Image (cartoon, rainbow, N blue to C red):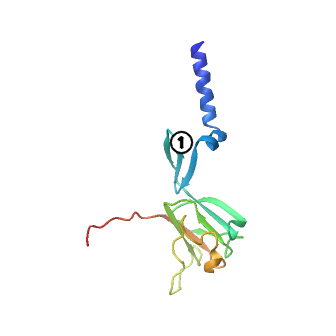
Amino acid sequence: MKLFITIITFLSAMSVSASPLFDALFLHKRQIGGVRLYLSPAILVSTLTSSFKVLICTGANQTGDCTHKVYELEKCHQLPKPYYHNVSTFAPDGESFQCYPRTTGCDDICKSPTGCTFGPVDFNYEHKDNLTAIQWNTLFSSFDCFLKKKKSSSLLA
C-alpha cells in the first residue's frame, strides 16, 4: 500500500510540475537569447535552444500586424509582405544576441557610401518599439542576427 501511495504521489507531483499553471505560479521564466531560464527558490535550470526570437510589427509599440518568430543566427532573413518596407517594431527577445536591419534585400549588394544599416538592435535598444523615431520604418528590407561578442578586459594602459 505504501508503494502504491508513493507512486501516485510521485506521478501527481510530476503532472503538476509539468502544467502551465505550476509554471505561472511557481517558476519565473525568462527567454534570454538562446537560453531559457527557469527560476524557483530551489532550482535554476538552463535549457539551451538553437534559435532566437524577434518580434516584428507594422505599427509602433508592438501594434498592427505582428509576427514573433524564431530566426536562425548568421543568416539573412528577407522580410515578406506586409513587413517589407513597413516595420515600426523590431524587438529581439534576448540580451545575448543582436540583429542588423538592412535597407537592401538578402541578395542585393549595398552601394550606399554610408552603409545599409543603422547598426545593431538588441533587447536594450532605445527605439526597438518605434523605428519611426529614426525614420527607418519605410526602409527595412532584411536583417541578420549574431551572438554578441564578449568584451575582453585589457591590462594594457
Which quadrant does the C terminus fall into? bottom left
Q: Nearer the viewer, residue 66 or 30?
A: 30
Which quadrant does the N terminus fall into? top right
Q: Position of residue 60 (x, y in %)?
A: 68, 71
Q: Residue furthest front?
A: 41
Q: Nearer the viewer, residue 75 or 132?
A: 132
What residue lies at 60% left-to-right and 79% top-to-bottom? Answer: 134
What residue lies at 63% left-to-right and 28% top-to-bottom? Answer: 12
Tag 1, which secondary structure?
A: loop
Q: Looking at the image, can residue 62 be seen?
A: yes
Q: What number of labels is visible?
A: 1
Q: Position of residue 22 (x, y in %)?
A: 63, 39
What residue lies at 40% left-to-right and 63% top-to-bottom? Answer: 150
Relative to 66, is 44 on the left or the right? left
Residue 132 vs 17, above or below: the answer is: below
Mark 1 residue type: Ser
Quadrant hosting residue 153: bottom left
Relative to 130, is 154 on the left or the right? left
Question: Dot 1 corresponds to which residue?
Answer: 40
Q: Looking at the image, can residue 136 be seen?
A: no
Q: Position of residue 20 (x, y in %)?
A: 65, 41
